[in-house]
Amino acid sequence: KYNIILGKKLAAKLKVEINDLVSIIALNNDESPSVTNLPLIEQFKVSGVYESGMAEYDDIFAYINFSTAKNLFEINDQVTGYNINLKNISEIDSTKNLLQDLLPYPYYVRSYRDINKHIFTWLELQQKPIPIVLGLIIIVAVFNIVGALLMLIIQKTEAIGVLKSLGATGKQIVLIFVFQGLFLAGVGILLGNMFAFILSWLQNTYKIISLPEQIYYLSAVPIFIDLRMYVLISAVGLALAFFAALIPSYIASRIQPITAIKFN
């Protein structure tokens, strides 16, 4: 028996498992079967079941040996299509245009974006509000840092007065509270990165957040863990924390020693 690999949904639809037998019927010359035009029938053993995460593919695609396909469908050395994988995803459009210019009609070239145009349209629509949401989160975080430092300054006003009376300069007071703000931001960023990485890993491993395959063509929400983005976002967060800490730090540096010591 020949071997065949089925998509998970296709195998479920056919109610077959590994080592079960399935039959493939190949029409002769793509014409309707008749007494004088009998189709070719061949049995295959299910040697594997794959799950790509794309229901559209798992539901319709099966894989057999190329030499077996040539004999079954009588296509000799001809093929109906090629799949090309590129190392650099940014070269997809240029490669597509180059191949399309080289290939005459009726041959055509389609990228994965063309095949799944509705999915990428949906993703682009979902991405539009992301900058707004992130901007609001950043604004809230900045105000939290400013508020926390202002509360700390109020609590430490007398200590600030003592330090200034002992000779501490305004610049030194600013540095104290800037470092305090950076410490608070650093702890928050570290914990945030840890939770984000753990939740992303859990989602990729256990598919906690599932999706209806009939609508989104995906069985679960995919998450790509990019360490460069972690570093970039952490650096931006620390930079914003630094600038947010300057305002209350400057206020603290302007407090007069006499007033601060008498503050209650």
Image: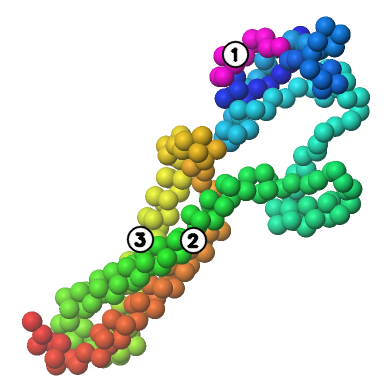
Q: CA distance from mark 3 to mark 2?
A: 26 Å
Image quarter where the C terminus lies is bottom left
Q: Is residue 53 visible?
A: yes
Residue position for label 2 = 128
Tell me the distance, in whole angstroms, between the alpha carbons under discs 1 and 3. 51 Å
Q: Residue beneath label 1, please?
A: 16
Q: Earlier in the sequence, mark 1 or mark 3?
A: 1
Whether residue 13 appears in magenta in the rendering, the answer is: yes
Q: Are marks 1 and 2 in contact (CB under 8 Å)?
A: no
Quarter of the image for residue 136 reads bottom left
**Which amino acid, mark 3?**
Gly
Color theme of the render = rainbow
* Left or right: 5, with 109 as reference point: left
- Secondary structure beneath dot 1 equals loop
- Residue 2 in sight: no
**Mark 1: few, some, or many residues within 10 Å (few <14, many ≥20)?**
some
> At x 47% / y 35%, what residue is drawn?
212
| Mark positioned earlier in the residue sequence (3 or 2) | 2
Which residue is labeled 3 in the image? Answer: 188
Q: CA distance from mark 1 to mark 2?
A: 43 Å
| Magenta extent | 12-23
Mark nearer the N terminus (1 vs 2): 1
Identify the residue at image location x=25%, y=91%: 254
Q: Is label 3 in a helix, a strand or a loop?
A: helix
